[in-house]
């Protein structure tokens, strides 16, 4: 739109026509205070804090609802305006309890900040304050009515942003009150967005309330360890007897790809880290029982046994199962360790999407994958399969708000009437399992339309839909694990005919994409290079066994036949999650690295207590292929990162360390204190060093040494390091990926997690458990009557 | 009624009034029914009901006696009319007689200042009231019942 020029406080401001005055002021650094105004939510004009003087207008105007006009002369700060704002604050404080010393929001409260700014500490009101008791609306949402200033941000974010509409306003005037949808409790997606967006302490979090004060925590923005969307969550950590305890997760750091959004898992489900069942000592099986041991004993035993098996019977007798929640560096290291140190290609992980097929289909196509940010800006989106609201909450948010704010066209093909159909331009329901047929039809097979046509959608309607999709440009095609193998290739064929079309392949765990990209496959090296041949990895890594190894089902078969002498499981629970008979590996020497005694860990001969993704540094690649930095927030004494453990095992096997991790060669640096009050300083120093390419990499446990190798060798990962270290996401590309080998599409098994579950990890989160219990009880009540 | 409005939800307030006249009050069933018909959540319907004092979710008497005590009526004796009704019916503000015949309500301006004091019984206005006149109004109601 054409630009409009106006004057604010003597400064010339130019902004596109249609811009709100409050936003135009922001662009030149003039802050107009407001409570009710929130970017990208509907306008409310309720709080009257943003009053400004506009020449030729008789009264003070609200900057949040005024659209800028040519030649407007605005004053944002004068005695009159100050007085008006002060009076508004006085009214807001009329019933406000002023319990700041015990309020969760104290120290990060917008009302507090305003009161300090405008000095409305004294009040003319003599009347007794109108007190109402606090209410608990759900296991994670509490509401303290008197603190509420009725800005309606929570109501709008819940309705417009989340499409949940669980909050409303009851009564009017002085007795207005925010109300939940079920009389005294909430029935919602429990995302906690209402708590985050509350400018005061009216809505507080069950997980955090009354635990600590904001200034007593250190705030670390890192990537969530649950689903594959890669939201940034800010973890508030505090010193504890056992190291650094995570006490809060929220969206304070809005710099992530998720912007304002965070779901229940990113916000509350960090508590598995503080679970009392955490392992903090290595365990070795002695006389049939797992007994505590020292790290040295454990590494020595593992190193000796692995080396013996490799040297006597060959590496092919050893199996390796990697994780979908460990960092790229750890996945890469594990892939390399298996091939180079253990001499085995028996490497696999829990596959939740067919990334090899995607890489193969997109080979040579530049810019063919969409980033999470692009899902929010694309003019049109096609969604086949999956239920993003449950399994990919950020993706659902991006789609929903793209439709709401940019009027994107959404086409949904699904076997269920998923919630996103409410935003859809076109929704087509198909029989379960027909997603591949839909892809074939879109790719041009009219025969497929006959099988797809059903009572609700006739063949002509399918053809009309395809024509409409073909007419789109820059279409983003999002698909779930229903589309694999051949179906995936067909879908890519269809998309490739559309100008600017991009793909998003949905996988379920935080670093499922990373595990695939880093080559946790029996027949693939990092970057989808075939195990056979002469890739850059063959040249750099040295000798790699040439025959494709066993995949997970293959390892199970070998275990049953007594052919698998050792199994090394890193951060995975195949026995519990993939329904494997626990006695399968009774003849194998099993080593498990995990946080808890999972179904897999209890059958192990050695269990090593692992740190989780919130307790280490590295990078994650989300399901779209966005590479992001994982920062260490918490710490539990007695655990080690998987990275360190892999390195220590290689060392115990007598492997030359520099061949595995290219450390050293950096500068010597004083890193300062890493703990306590000055710890932030050391971190800043480290960040500065890293940003200038001076990372010390003084130890073989430094994952950035491996990140160097990943960026150098893995195709598509050669992205801006400075941008990555600054906390931004960097989109990787599959265009240069290796020619991947044929894959078994049936090996893809979705995690089927809901909003309130998260694989094995979710079982150890009290917050998730309490919420899902509260939801279950209610459904039982309903079915009873 | 829905087609008369540009968006479905706009029909809510008139629909609520019709439903209230028919059922007597806005029961949970009514709320659920209207929410379904207008594509709203029950919460949204309840929000609107709680905003307007003329809408009620509790059963009222057959005759809803609304006595104005706003400024014009106040200076012309509205308060006495209200007290008189309260005494006669034996219920206070927002009360309902045990026989379910009358409800009493003290209301703000009903736009009949020129003929103050005024009261409204259901949709009928009664103006220039005195206690005697009010008695007559109430007695007539009782006769009708």
Image (tube, coloured by chain):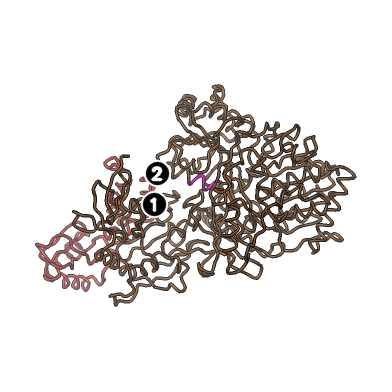
User: Which color was chain B given?
Assistant: red
Residue A565: x percent and y percent?
85, 46
Asked if residue A220 shows in the view, the reply is yes
Q: Quadrant of the N terminus of chain A?
A: top left
Residue under circle 1? A39
Measure the C-alpha gap from mark 1 to mark 2.
11 Å
Report the residue at 70% width, 45% height from top.
Answer: A332
Residue under circle 2? A405
Q: Which one is in front, A489 or B145? A: A489
Q: Which one is in front, A132 or A66? A: A66
Disc 1 versus disc 2: nearer the observer: 1
* Chain seen in brown: A
Residue A137: x percent and y percent?
47, 62
Q: Is residue A415 left or right of residue B122?
A: right
Report the residue at 37% width, 58% height from top.
Answer: A152
| Main secondary structure of the magenta stretch | helix
Residue A638: x percent and y percent?
72, 64
**Magenta segment range?**
A391-397
Report the residue at 39% width, 73% height from top.
Answer: A98
Q: Is residue A379 left or right of residue A53?
A: right
Mark 2 neighbour class, 10 Å CA radius: few under 14, some 14 to 19, many 20 or more: few
Asked if residue A757 shows in the view, the reply is no
Q: Earlier in the sequence, mark 1 or mark 2?
A: 1
């Amino acid at each position: 739109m054409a630009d409009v020029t106006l004057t604010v406080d003597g400064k010339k401001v130019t902004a596109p026509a249609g811009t709100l005055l409050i936003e135009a002021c922001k662009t030149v650094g003039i802050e107009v205070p407001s409570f009710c105004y929130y970017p990208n939510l509907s306008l409310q004009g309720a709080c009257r804090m943003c009053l400004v003087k506009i020449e030729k207008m008789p009264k003070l105007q609200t900057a949040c609802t005024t659209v800028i006009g040519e030649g407007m002369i605005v004053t944002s700060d004068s005695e009159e305006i100050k007085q008006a704002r002060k009076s508004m604050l006085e009214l807001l404080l009329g019933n406000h309890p002023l319990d700041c010393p015990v309020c969760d929001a104290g120290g990060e409260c917008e009302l507090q900040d305003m009161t300090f700014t405008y000095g409305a500490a004294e009040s003319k009101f003599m009347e007794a304050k109108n007190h109402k008791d606090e209410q608990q609306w759900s296991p994670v949402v509490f509401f303290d009515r008197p603190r509420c200033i009725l800005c309606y941000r929570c109501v709008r974010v819940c309705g417009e942003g989340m499409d949940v509409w669980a909050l409303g306003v009851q009564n009017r005037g002085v007795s207005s009150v925010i109300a939940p949808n079920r009389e005294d409790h909430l029935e919602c997606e429990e995302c906690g967005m209402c708590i985050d967006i509350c400018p005061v302490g009216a809505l507080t979090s069950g997980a955090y309330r009354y635990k600590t004060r904001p200034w007593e925590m250190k705030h670390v923005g890192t990537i969530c360890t649950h689903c594959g969307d890669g939201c940034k969550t800010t973890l508030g950590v505090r010193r504890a007897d056992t190291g650094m305890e995570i006490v809060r997760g929220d969206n304070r750091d809005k710099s992530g790809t998720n912007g304002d959004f965070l779901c229940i898992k990113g916000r509350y489900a960090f508590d598995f880290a503080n679970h009392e069942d955490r392992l903090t000592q290595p365990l070795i099986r002695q006389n049939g029982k797992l007994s505590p041991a020292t790290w040295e004993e454990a590494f020595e035993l593992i190193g000796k046994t692995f080396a013996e098996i490799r040297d006597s019977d060959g590496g092919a007798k050893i199996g390796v199962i990697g994780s979908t929640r460990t960092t790229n560096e750890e996945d890469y290291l594990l892939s390399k360790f298996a091939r180079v140190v253990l001499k085995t290609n028996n490497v696999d992980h829990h596959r939740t999407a067919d990334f090899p097929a995607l890489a193969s289909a997109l080979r040579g196509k530049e810019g063919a994958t969409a980033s999470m940010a692009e899902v929010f800006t694309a003019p049109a989106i096609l969604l086949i399969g999956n239920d993003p609201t449950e399994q990919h909450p950020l993706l659902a948010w991006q789609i929903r708000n793209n439709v709401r704010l940019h009027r994107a066209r959404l086409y949904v093909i699904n076997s269920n009437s998923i919630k996103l159909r409410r935003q859809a331009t076109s929704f087509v329901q198909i029989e379960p399992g027909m997603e591949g047929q839909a892809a074939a039809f879109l790719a041009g097979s009219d025969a497929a339309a006959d099988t797809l046509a059903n009572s609700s959608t006739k063949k002509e309607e399918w053809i009309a839909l395809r024509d409409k999709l073909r007419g789109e440009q820059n279409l983003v095609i999002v698909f779930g694990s229903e589309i694999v193998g051949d179906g995936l290739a067909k879908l890519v064929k269809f998309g490739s005919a559309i100008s600017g079309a991009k793909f998003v392949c949905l996988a379920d765990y935080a670093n499922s994409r990373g595990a695939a990209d880093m080559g946790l496959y029996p027949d693939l090296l990092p970057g989808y290079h075939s195990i056979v041949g002469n890739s850059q990895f063959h040249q750099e890594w040295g000798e790699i066994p040439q025959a494709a190894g066993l995949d997970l089902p293959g390892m199970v078969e070998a275990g049953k036949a007594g052919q698998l002498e050792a199994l090394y499981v890193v951060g995975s629970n195949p026995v519990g999650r993939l329904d494997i008979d626990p006695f399968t590996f009774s003849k194998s020497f099993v080593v498990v690295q995990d946080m808890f005694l999972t179904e897999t860990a209890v059958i192990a001969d050695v269990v090593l207590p692992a740190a989780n993704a919130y307790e280490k540094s590295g990078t994650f690649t989300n399901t779209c292929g966005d590479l992001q930095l994982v920062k260490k927030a918490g710490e539990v004494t007695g655990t080690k990162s998987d990275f360190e453990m892999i390195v220590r095992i290689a060392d115990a096997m007598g492997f030359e360390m520099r061949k595995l991790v290219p450390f050293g060669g950096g500068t010597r640096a004083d890193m300062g204190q890493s703990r306590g009050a000055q710890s932030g300083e050391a971190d800043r120093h480290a960040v500065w060093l890293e940003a200038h390419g001076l990372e010390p990499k003084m130890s073989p446990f430094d994952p950035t040494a491996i990140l160097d190798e990943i960026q150098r060798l893995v195709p598509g990962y050669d992205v801006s390091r400075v941008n990555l270290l600054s906390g931004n996401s960097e989109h990787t590309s599959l265009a240069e990926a290796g020619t991947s080998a044929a894959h078994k599409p049936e090996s893809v098994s979705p995690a089927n997690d809901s909003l309130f579950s998260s694989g094995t990890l979710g079982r150890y989160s009290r917050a998730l458990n309490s919420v899902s219990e509260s939801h279950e009880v209610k459904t039982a009540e309903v079915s009873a009557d | 009624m829905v087609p008369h409005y540009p968006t479905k939800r706009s029909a809510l307030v008139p629909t609520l009034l019709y439903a209230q006249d028919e059922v007597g009050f806005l029961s949970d069933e009514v709320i659920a029914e209207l929410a379904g018909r207008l594509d709203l959540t029950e919460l949204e319907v309840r929000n609107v009901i709680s905003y307007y004092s003329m809408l009620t979710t509790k059963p009222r008497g057959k005759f809803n006696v609304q006595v104005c005590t706003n400024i014009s009526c106040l200076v012309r004796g509205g308060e006495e009319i209200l007290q008189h009704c309260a005494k006669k019916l034996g219920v206070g503000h927002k009360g309902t007689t045990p026989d379910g015949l009358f409800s009493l309500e003290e209301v703000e301006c009903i736009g009949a200042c020129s003929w103050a004091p005024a009261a409204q019984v259901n949709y009928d206005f009664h103006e220039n009231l005195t206690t005697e006149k009010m008695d007559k109004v109430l007695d007539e109601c009782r006769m009708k019942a």
